[in-house]
Amino acid sequence: MKKFFLIIAVFIFTGISNAQNIKNEKFVYVGSYNMSGLMTQFAQITIQTKPITTSKKTFIHSSLIATTYTKWDTFFKIRDLYESYVDPVTYKPSMYKRNTLEGNYRKTEKYVFSNGKVTSTSTRMGSPEVTKTFPVGASTNDIVTAVLRLRKMDFNKIRAGQIITFVIAFDNKEFPASVKFMGKETLKNLGNLGTKECYKLSIAANTKALRGNDKNVFWMTADTNRIPVLIQFSIPVGTGQVKLTNAIVN
Amino acid sequence: MRKFLIILTIFFLVFSLIFVILPMGTIALLPTGLALAGGILAFVKSEPALRKMPKWLMITAIALFVVALGKVIFVKNEAENDQVFLQEQIQSTEEAQQELEELDEMGNTDQASDAQPTVAPDSIQ
C-alpha cells in the first residue's frame, strides 16, 4: 500500500505556481482500487499548495494528504503526509518530508537539500532515527519538485512520443525517471471541472514500484493551471486510479 | 440440480457475508445477488415438502442483499476528521518553517540553478 501512495505522490503531488504569484490550490481526489474488475473507493487524497515565508524568503509549500475513508479505517488505516518546500524561482527543493502510517507500517523521512547534497533523516517502525548524507546532481529533484517542473513545462514544444527525463532522490539515493508525452485527450466527469482537454503522460522509473509499459498514466489539464485530474496506476499488487473530485485555484 | 443449487447458494452466501462485513461498496451486491438468484432457483426446483432449507437460504440472501444495498445508499465515503493527524500536519509545517529559517540564516538553501528536465530530441514510441 505504501507503494501506491508513493506513486500517487510521484504523479500528482504539489501545485503549480510562479515566482511572482504562488497560487493557493486545493485539489481533492478519490482513490480507488481495482477488485475483480470493479473499482472500490477507499481513500481521499488532498493536495494543497500555498506560499510559506521565512524572514528572508518565500517557498512553495506543497502537501499531499492521503486518508482512508472512515469505513476502511478499522481494516486498513492510512494517514499519509508528503510535503515539499520548493524555491519558487528555481524550482529547486529545499526540504522534503514524508510521514506515513499505513496499517502497522510507520515511516518518517526528511530530506534537506543544500550545497549539492541531501541530508536525510528517517525513522521506520519505531526504530532509532537514522541520518545519512548523499551527494546529488544539480538537476536532482525530490518527487514533488519533479512534478512541479513537469507541470510548468511548455508542452507546445514537445511532440507526442517524446520522453522527458528526471533524476529523483528517493530512499537515500538518486534514480532516473522518465515521462513520455502521449498527446492530448479530452476527459469527462472531472469533478467541478467538468470536461477538459488534458495532456496525457506515461511514467516510467527504474523501480519495482511501477509495473508495465504505459500502464502508469496520468492526465493533467491542458490549460494554465495544469491540474492533475486522473491517474491510472499498475503496481505489483494490482491496479487502480485516483480521480479528481474538486479543484480550487485562487 | 436442487442439491447443486443449494451448495452454490451457500457458497455465495459465505462470500456475501464477508463482502457485507467488509466495506466493499457495490461489489458486495454481486455475491449477494448471485446468492439470492441461487436461493430462488433452489426454492423453485424443490418439491413443496423440501422447501424449508431453500426458503431460509433465500431469506438470508435477501437480508444480506438489503444490508449491502443499504450500505451502498446510506454509508457515504467520508474521510475521518482525525484531530491527531491534523495536529501532526500543523506541527510538521511549523517545524519545517523553523528549519528553513535556520537554513536561510546559514545560507544553506540551494541557490538559483534552474536545472530543467531533459527532453529527448527524437520521438520514441
Image (cartoon, rainbow, N blue to C red):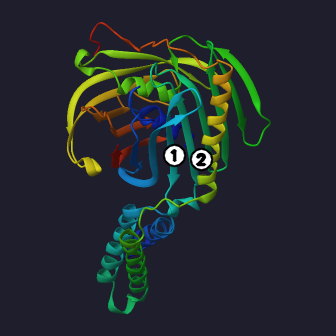
Q: Residue at x 38, y 78 (%)?
A: B66
Check disc 1 and report the residue beneath it.
A65
State the SS at label 2: helix
Rendered location of residue A186, percent (x, y): 19, 37
Closer to the camera, B8 or B18?
B18
Chain hosting mark 1: A
Disc number lying in front (2 or 1): 2
Q: Quadrant location of residue A221?
A: top left
Residue A159 seen by the camera: no
Above or below: residue A90 compared with residue A68? above
Rendered location of residue B103, percent (x, y): 66, 24
Give the distance between the C-alpha atoms of the residues marked 2 and 1, in whole angstroms: 9 Å
Indicate left or right for A250 with A193 as reference: right
Q: How many numbered discs sit on the rendered protein?
A: 2
Check disc 2 and report the residue beneath it.
B89
Closer to the camera, A210 or A16?
A16
Contact between marks 2 and 1 (CB within 8 A): the answer is yes
Above or below: residue B92 compared with residue B35? above
Q: Are marks 2 and 1 on the same chain?
A: no
